[in-house]
Image (spheres, rainbow, N blue to C red):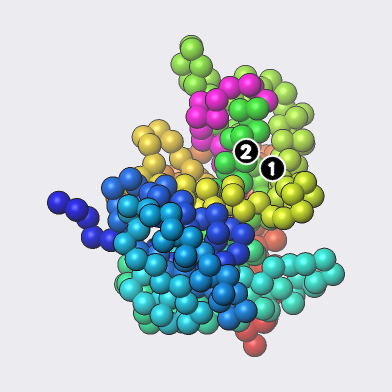
Amino acid sequence: MSKNAVRVLVTGAAGQIGYALVPMVARGAMLGPDQPVILHMLDIEPAAEALNGVKMELIDAAFPLLKDVIATTDVVEACTGVDIAVMVGGFPRKEGTERKDVMSKNVSIYKAQASALEKHANTDCKVLVVANPANTNALILKEFAPSIPEKNITCLTRLDHNRALGQISERLDIQVSDVKNVIIWGNHSSTQYPDVSHATVTSSDGQKPARELIADDQWLRTEFIKTVQQRGAAIIKARKLSSALSAASSACDHICDWVLGTPKGTWVSMGVYSDGSYGIPSGLIYSFPVTCEKGEWSIVQGLKIDEFSRTKMDATANELIEEKSLAYSCLN
């Protein structure tokens, strides 16, 4: 018996990330190879023609799982009945733009979109915020969509998580699939902390600690962290455009694991609402290691935190406290 179609909203769908993401969703990379989808694509009025072009391409690609495409500039039409919302649209920070100006513009965007999701999305809608500042945009969305459960509002740090896996696999010259359980703590920003303290590598001798195999704490505490933190900027420098393909792929990974579950013994990084775990203040959207089962995420508990990690984790939490304060000042 065929499954009912899942309605997936992608905002900013005519942009670089949206353009890379929608075919992945339509092909089954997000929800599985047997799950039909209806795509809701939202963008701003100046992008309406480009958005229609994306719709034409989706139709032309003849994806078997794609049951319908709604391309609109109307936020209510876009949000009506959606089960999953991937919030890619936002106001980007450009050279010379003040942080407060970016925050102010994103606060107004996410306030409006939160209200539409609150009124028109399905009651158990899962939300993933991709647009930067992702953690704080997610917090604003949560503030203005109070009937959406806080556990259903997340932000993307899976891209950073995947970047960390990639760096370790390159360093050890192994398959990336043989590396697991890195952690991204904190903010999706240059203060994030990529942590390999608990990461493992599958070798012919079984599971080995990644740290032991790398055997270079100096590299792990300096160049590795910096490379993951600054990877987005390095891609912009090389491509003259932001990292669209990897962001889209990571958004699919995030939702796929959230909905279908993480493999046993494996965790992933998600920006979620802090409950005070690991001494992180409640009321922040902070990246933690999580496992997922039956559509629910749970923060991995009981991991040993050394002094180096504690300092890094607190620094990124402090940045999120500042961002939250700045965002809330834009509400007044």
Residue 185 forms part of the magenta stretch: yes
Rendered location of residue 188, percent (x, y):
64, 55
Q: Residue at x 62, y 41 (%)?
A: 163
Residue 114 forms part of the magenta stretch: no
Rendered location of residue 319, percent (x, y):
70, 61
Amino acid type, mark 1: Val
Residue 74 in view: yes
Up-down relation of residue 176 to residue 38 (above or below): above
Q: As drawn, which residue projects farthest toward the right? A: 96
Name the quadrant containing residue 7. Answer: bottom left
Q: Residue at x 72, y 27 (%)?
A: 217
Q: Residue at x 48, y 60 (%)?
A: 57
Q: Which stretch appears magenta?
A: 171-186
Up-down relation of residue 67 to residue 24 (above or below): below
Q: As drawn, which residue projects farthest toward the bottom? A: 332
Q: What secondary structure is found at the residue carrying circle 2?
A: helix
Q: What secondary structure is found at the residue carrying circle 1?
A: helix
Rendered location of residue 219, percent (x, y):
75, 30
Residue beneath label 1, please? 228
Give the distance between the C-alpha atoms of the residues marked 1 and 2, in whole angstroms. 6 Å
User: Mark 1 or 2 closer to N-term?
Assistant: 2
48 vs 218, left or right, is left
Q: Residue at x 50, y 29 (%)?
A: 177
Contact between labelled residues 2 and 1, with CB atoms less than 8 Å apart: yes
Residue beneath label 2, please? 164
Amino acid type, mark 2: Ala
Labels in figure, total: 2
Mark 2: give few (<14), some (14-19) or many (20+) Cα within 10 Å: many
204, 289: nearer the viewer: 204
Residue 274 in view: no
225 vs 258, left or right, is right
Rendered location of residue 247, percent (x, y):
58, 52
